Amino acid sequence: MKANRNNILQLYITLALLIFNTSVSLAQEGPLAGKQATSLDALEKMLYRPDDSLKVVALKLLCWEFRNSDPDKAVEYGEKAVKIAIALNLNFELADSYNRLGIAYRNTGKYAQALECYFKGMEISKVHGYENLLAFQFNNLADLYSRLELYDRAKEFGKKALEIGQKIKDDYTLSYIYNILGTIYRNQNILDSALSNFTLSLELRKKIGFSPGIATANLNIGRTLLQLGQYDSSLKYLNVAADIYADNNDLQGMIIVNLQRGLLYNRIGKFDKAISFFKKSLEINQKFGDYQVARDAHRGLGNSYSKLGNWSSAYSHLDQSVAINDSITLSQFVERLTQLTETLRFEETLNLQKEKEKVLAERLSLQRSLIRLYAAIIILLTLLVGLAIFFYIKRSKDVRLLQAQKEEINNLNHAKDRFFSILAHDLKNQLTSMVTIAHMVKEKSIELDDDKLINLSKRLYALGFSTNDLLDNVLSWIKVQNKQVEVKSTPVKLKQLVDKVIYSQQPAADMKQVTIQNKVPSDLIIDSDPDRLSTIVRNLLSNAIKFSNISGKVEIEASTIGNHLEVNITDYGVGIPEEKLNNLFSARGIESSPGTLEEQGSGIGLMICRNLANDLKGSIRVSSQIHKGSTFTIILPLKGDTFS
């Protein structure tokens, strides 16, 4: 480890010398070049040098420099730094790059990716004892939980960061930690504690001469004083922050400081000035797309114009504020679902040495508070994983058994994470479409004739039908995973069973004018489990309709061959690419593919069909040609034989 740190130190020294030399050579290019632009040019020139170790350092520094002015570019540099650091096995650089990349993701609003980076960097820092990086990672987690309004968790991570920062006595690290703690207290309206922490942060940043940090501390003090009603003092701090942000080309800082100045001038009755600052904030925010800033700026403009008697402009901006707030509400709901899914793995690692019952109770409590709508699904899956881990530890008699159970748990985690990701994505799309149609009907009902209103109603009905189908598959998947229902064979009249399935899917077929032909012989009877068989036929028929063209046709046939039965479901739609056929029924093949009318689905239906067919001691095969259609064949035994 010592040799590795020495190598990294040499890299930093080399890089510093190269940047200095390049800065001197570029200083004569013009009076507007400036120190920062020159340094960035020097860093970017390092990327063309052959030494990959040097490139990692340059890339992570570029990621950091662009985090506030161009976060998308910062993400690009950060991802390259991580990739090279992994290839070269540079542990310190990898942990540091993950931390900086996480902040870039956070600034683009991608909280789930930011959390993933923080967790990966934290694991490396713990293993190798990088306490300085660990303090920043805890601090970044505190910041993210604060943004999600989980203040108790935010303070927990903030205090952990403060303990490490005070232990290593690093002013730079402590200045960041005091800043985040102040933000948490301010969001909770504990303003005296917030002001105290921001002041400590400002003192440390002045001591080390950290210009961007000084601007941030001034901004936060100004915001807190504004909440306290100390307007003159607040304006002084905000103006200092604005000057530094402008010098450093920190666009994200300028967005916030202009918004705060607008709010301040509204408070003291200078509405023309307030309007000017709100518009500057909105203009810069077009590049970043921060919905909360846009909402607050439009709300401030609405208040300003209403005080000036300009009711038309006031109404327009207040209306935009309400629309953005509605969008934020939906986006935050889906983001919190995704964030919780990504957090589960970290929570297990963080509390590995605590009692299993305690960890489970805490996890379930967090799940209920964030996603009550999906609490039942998440609790069942978490219990499944928790029980698997419990029996894994209790019954591990030898190395082979331990390894087998570990692989099983990893597979369950992978399937769970992928399932949650697809479920969150598809439910978001379904709900967003339904809300959009409902909004159109509400806002434009006077302009809609009967035909258009009927079409919108049909679309809304189809979305509801598709969402119901998705939830049916989710429940089937849970039952398959938990093996809740035993196989109960009984004589089944196959034609009648198929007729019932067709009836349930007829609304989806009618939307696309797809004809369904039941060619199953009326006298065909098989001993099987009717519930499992109906679920298989329903999923395959739903897929056939989904990927059929308008006015298409689906045929269902059945025949006995030897000692087994074959049921063929054939469509004449878009077909399946050859490269997808091998993984079509496996967890790796789970993919949400839109139908010919952009119908949504979870992608787990075929995997459910395979598992149910296995329960019936049968199998499923598929043949397909692009643009000609597909045939799915269900093979079931007549006398208890097994086919694979």
Image (cartoon, grey):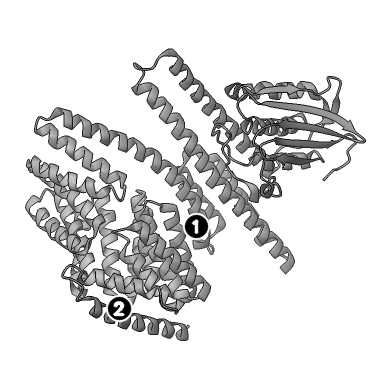
The answer to whether residue 417 of the structure is visible from this angle is yes
Tell me residue 574's x, y (percent).
64, 36
Who's the residue at 89% across and 41% down the image?
641
Q: Nearer the viewer, mark 1 or mark 2?
A: 2
Q: Residue at point 60% right, 45% down?
A: 591
Residue 373 seen in the figure: no
Q: Residue at x 56, y 41 (%)?
A: 377
Q: Residue 549: which numbered mark, if any?
A: none
Asked which secondary structure carries label 1, the reply is: helix
Q: Nearer the viewer, residue 353 or 372?
A: 372
Answer with the quarter of the image where residue 515 lies: top right
Q: Are marks 1 and 2 in contact (CB under 8 Å)?
A: no
Q: Is residue 394 above or below residue 4?
A: above
Quadrant assignment, res 30: bottom left
In the rendered structure, which amino acid carries the disc numbered 1? Glu
Q: Is residue 72 above or below residue 317?
A: below
Q: Position of residue 55 (x, y in %)?
A: 41, 74
**Sequence-first disc among 1 and 2:** 2
Q: CA distance from mark 1 to mark 2?
A: 41 Å
Residue under circle 2? 19
Please tell me whether mark 2 sits on a helix, a strand or a loop: helix
Within 10 Å of disc 2 (Cα), the crowding (few <14, some 14-19, many 20+) is many
Viewer-side residue, 280 vs 140 = 280
Q: Is residue 379 left or right of residue 160?
A: right
- Towards the viewer: 141 or 588: 588
Q: Which residue occupies the extreme right position in the image?
A: 562
In the rendered image, which residue does mark 1 sit on?
Answer: 347
Count of picture labels: 2
